[in-house]
Amino acid sequence: MPHRAPRLDIWLLDTDWRPIGRVEGDAPWRMVVAHSIRLQSRWLRLEQARDRRDPPRPLPADIALTRTLRRRLRPLGIDLADHLIRHGDATFSFRANRLL
């Protein structure tokens, strides 16, 4: 069975961090920003679904992605509420683990 890349979804959240929209992670970032502006969403949550063979914790690339996105989105008035990595029944939260 081939190894799959983790699926990434970007959830657009309201001010109470409730989902109001979703964009697939492979969408162009201008689309994510456009949807955020259209829906007046100032918060995003990244959600990755990991293959069972991948570790249930962030890889260095996950941490770099999160930091880069946060740095690039802040000037637009958009911030990350969390980055979740789902692995089977387990979930790793960047916010809960103080990586945000």
Image (spheres, grey):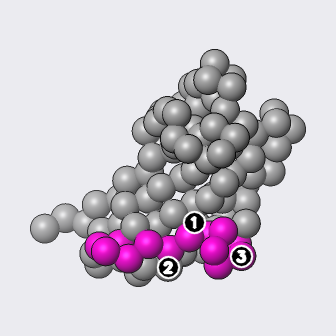
Query: Hey, which residue is sitting farthest top in the picture?
Result: 38
Please state which of the two labelled residues, at mark 1 or mark 2, is closer to the viewer. Answer: 2
Task: Check disc 2 and report the residue beneath it.
Answer: 57
Distance of label 1 from label 2 (alpha carbons) = 9 Å
The type of residue carrying mark 1 is Asp
Going by the numbered disc 2, the residue's amino acid type is: Arg
Residue 16 locus on image (x, y percent)? 65, 45
Q: Please name whichever residue, 62 or 3, is drawn nearer the observer in this view of the structure.
A: 62
Does residue 97 appear in the picture of this structure?
yes
Nearer to us in this view, 69 or 95 = 95
Task: Identify the secondary structure beneath mark 1.
Answer: helix
Q: CA distance from mark 1 to mark 3?
A: 14 Å
Q: Check disc 3 and report its element: helix, strand or loop.
A: loop
The reply to whether the magenta stretch includes residue 95 is: yes
The mark that comes first in sequence, 3 or 2, is 2
- Label of residue 98 in the image: 3
Local packing at callout 1 (Cα closer than 10 Å; few below 14, some 14-19, many 20+) is some
Q: Which residue is mark 1?
A: 62
Q: Which of marks 2 and 1 precedes in the sequence?
A: 2
Amino acid type, mark 3: Arg
Distance from label 3 to label 2 (Cα)?
A: 13 Å
Q: Residue at x 49, y 33 (%)?
A: 21
Q: Nearer the viewer, mark 1 or mark 3?
A: 3
Determine the residue positioned at 58% across, 50% down: 45
Q: What residue do we see at 29% from left, 73% from top?
A: 88
Give the mark toward the camera: 3 or 2.
Answer: 3
Q: Which residues are magenta?
A: 87-99
Against 30, is 87 above or below?
below
Identify the image quadrant of residue 29.
top right
